[in-house]
Amino acid sequence: MNVIYLGCNGFPVGYAQVQKQKMISKALIEAGSAVTVVSYKGVLKNTDKIKIPYKGEVEGIKYIFTSLSASRPENFMVRNFMKVLGTVFEFFTIILKTAGRRKSVAIITTNSLRRLIYYRCLLKILNCKVVFSYEEFWQSTFGTGDAGSFKNKLDQLAGKYCDAILPISDFLAAYQKNINKSVKLFKLPTLADFDLIDAIDGGERVDRILFCGASAYIETIEFIIDAFRLVEHNDIKLMLIIHGDAAQNEKISGLVRRSGKGDKIQIQSGLPYEQLIRLYKSSRLLLIPLRPVQRDEARFPHKISEYTASKTPFVTTAVGEVNTYFADGENAYIAKDFNAQAYAGKIMFALDNPQLSQRIANNAYNLGRANFDYKSISKSLDSFLNLI
């Protein structure tokens, strides 16, 4: 197949969406397909130390920024000119990459219904199949003022503008089936490159528990800090690896300062991938609490696949996909409720039982190898896309 990936900007540098994009691309390349990732605008800031060319190839995946730059200009006028340029060149790139190809598939990652409709109209003319990568329950992410707006109808209308959907969770799959029983679905969980993570040496474990995630999840990070305040292990430190804008990061710094345990909490951001994995592997415990809200029930954090691959035990809560794959005391530590006291109790139990924790981590690794390694879904995903 000839596969073109659209809608998600920033490849090959980025967080969960870009990493999922990379894993799906590698899975399809493993099965013999050719993949090109197209970004219509640059997202790297001038403060980012990473510099990448506007087109190239990474791990067998071809990519191009049609704005002719991977960077995001600071000047407002220049930035908007580059967006227009990127959109125009994206149009011609899509035609170049799909026109006349017998088996072409476009995978779309977007939270914009308008952009999905635009891609659908263009690709329909080019006889290219459209597949929607469905990773969030988007209506749960918009504000209450947007409840009835057109942009908030992506979940309801996505199936009308694509040939198939790749939901990340049972929640999203069931939602789409309820709308349209004939919709073609292929559940695609969180994915990681287990061979790559295996090859990274983590060194000796240190007295540290760690959370990695977006600083936009303020409630989750505040919950972790509250739970850490209740952990009765004076030698244990907490590391928060966060990414987000300056205002969000400052809010988290404020939470740390007011926690009473600020001397035991470290904040990091912008780490190279290998360093991030080394920190996972050298920590005693990893944290990924999920809230009992619709958004968390529907999503499946990318970090869970990386956590399982690192062979480090993790503590979570009984929400959404966690209940599909994991069992408390077998391959994860799972608090039944989103409660700081209960979560702190799980953390302390895990720290007090290192042998059990390592056995749980090994079980999680084996489960992850079977379900979350991109190679484990390579053939089945390729077959599904061929059938449509």
Image (cartoon, rainbow, N blue to C red):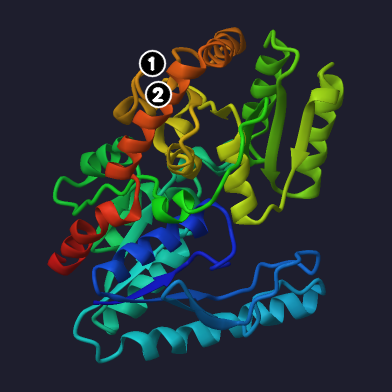
Left or right: residue 359 compared with residue 41: left
Under circle 1, the secondary element is loop
Q: Would you place residue 60 above or below residue 327 in this image? A: below
Q: Position of residue 357 (x, y in %)?
A: 46, 20
Q: Name the residue beneath numbered marker 2.
A: 360
Q: Position of residue 21 (x, y in %)?
A: 44, 61
Crowding near pointer 2: few (<14 within 10 Å), some, many (20+)? many
Number of numbered tags placed on the structure image? 2
Q: Which image quarter is the N terminus in?
A: bottom left
> Could you tell me how far apart the alpha carbons at marks 2 and 1 are, in whole angstroms?
7 Å
Q: Which image quarter is the C terminus in?
A: bottom left
Residue found 67% across the figure and 81% down from its top? 82
The image's mark for residue 384 is none
Q: Nearer the viewer, residue 281 or 182?
A: 281
Q: Name the residue beneath numbered marker 1.
A: 329
Q: Would you place residue 352 above or below residue 7 in this image? A: above
Under circle 2, the secondary element is helix
Kindly report which numbered mark, 2 or 1, lies closer to the viewer in this rendering: 2
The amino acid type, in three-letter code, at marker 1 is Gly
Q: Nearer the viewer, residue 22 or 248?
A: 22
The amino acid type, in three-letter code, at marker 2 is Ile
Q: Sequence order check: which comes first, mark 2 or mark 1?
A: 1
Q: Would you place residue 320 above or below residue 355 in this image? A: below
Q: Position of residue 74 (x, y in %)?
A: 81, 71
Crowding near pointer 1: few (<14 within 10 Å), some, many (20+)? some
Left or right: residue 38 compared with residue 144: left
Query: Can the viewer see residue 150 in this picture?
Result: no
Q: Position of residue 47 (x, y in %)?
A: 81, 64
Mark 2 and 1 residues: CB-CB less than 8 Å, in contact?
A: yes
Left or right: residue 197 compared with residue 274: left
Residue found 66% across the figure and 30% down from its top? 206
